[in-house]
Image (spheres, rainbow, N blue to C red):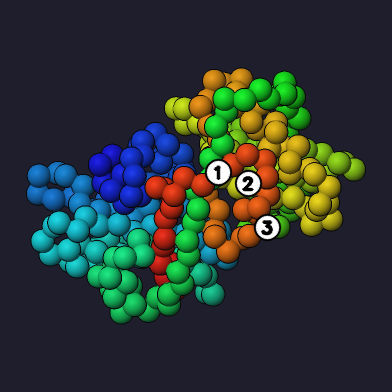
Amino acid sequence: MQNVLSESAGYTVSIEDEIAYFDPDTAKSWYLARGYDGQVLGFIRNFAQNSEWSLAELYVKRSIQNRGHVVYSLLNSFKGTVSFPAGHRLRIDILSHDVELNEILGKEGFSEKCQTFLYLERDLNVRTPQFKSESISNTDAASVSETLSHLHPVSETEAQKWIESKTIRGIRCEGKVVVAAQIYDSDDALEVNRIATHEKFLRRSFAKKLMEQVFAEASSLQKRKVYLKVEDVRLPAISFYKSIGFIENQDKRQVWHSRWY
């Protein structure tokens, strides 16, 4: 399975890192296609689902026979298990150069959007201030939801779940969480999965302060780096990240064709 995941990402990844993107206790998170020998031939993984939209990723090994049959089998399993309300948007990401998958999803009624994600990382071989964490509790779920929704819609239920899993970091001002980040812990790094500032508190250095706290936390945990992924069209965000020490690892740049259904 790890080999297939690394092949799908275009670089080596760990199964432990990747599993953090979904709820491992939810059966609907993974849809696997296996060969007669039990080897994983491909997968669909369901990243997120709320009332408005869902995100999934589709990958099937290129070297197998009857590849199209495997793709359709995965899609049918996925769509037959997960029900979507009227008006729901399902986005499936695939590698941009996978012509066969593009054609199949087009026949299934998905429209196309191309996105390029930059992989930015910051080395932690620098001195960082002592980390002082602000306590984020379940009572902050509404505030965290409101702030993170400045980037993408996040429900209060999702925010509460992330708070309970201790993956939310934030800074308060005027009684609310005005900047929040969701982080994941891997073997040698911390990933910033998302960070957003409340629209009423932009351009007041809250995001920079929070990132400095994340750097310090990573250092205290003896992590080698902090990294994140950002779409290449988000120029102000890219400029901000580079201003606080992130650099792009071009070997890990990813280009996806997103199919909207």
Q: Amino acid at mark 2?
A: Lys
Label 1: which secondary element: strand
Name the image quarter holding the C terminus: bottom left
Look at discs 2 and 3 and give the one toward the viewer. Answer: 2
Q: Residue at x 20, y 52 (%)?
A: 41
Q: Is residue 186 left or right of residue 239?
A: left
Determine the CA span between mark 2 and mark 1.
6 Å
- Residue corresponding to mark 2: 242
Q: Tell me the quarter of the picture where residue 125 sits.
A: top right
Determine the CA span between mark 2 and mark 3.
10 Å
Label 3: which secondary element: helix
* Above or below, comparing residue 129 to residue 43 in the picture: above
Q: Residue at x 43, y 52 (%)?
A: 253
| Disc 1 packing (10 Å; few <14; some 14–19; many ≥20) | some
Give residue 79's position: percent from left, percent from top.
36, 65
Can residue 209 be seen at all in this image of the molecule?
yes
Q: Residue at x 81, y 52 (%)?
A: 203
Of labels 2 and 3, earlier in sequence is: 3
| Disc 2 packing (10 Å; few <14; some 14–19; many ≥20) | some
Label 2: which secondary element: helix
Q: Is residue 92 left or right of residue 170?
A: left
Callout 2–callout 1 Cβ contact below 8 Å? yes
- Residue corresponding to mark 3: 236
Foreground pick, 180 / 77: 180
Give residue 69's position: percent from left, percent from top.
17, 66
Determine the CA span between mark 3 and mark 1.
15 Å
Foreground pick, 7 / 153: 7
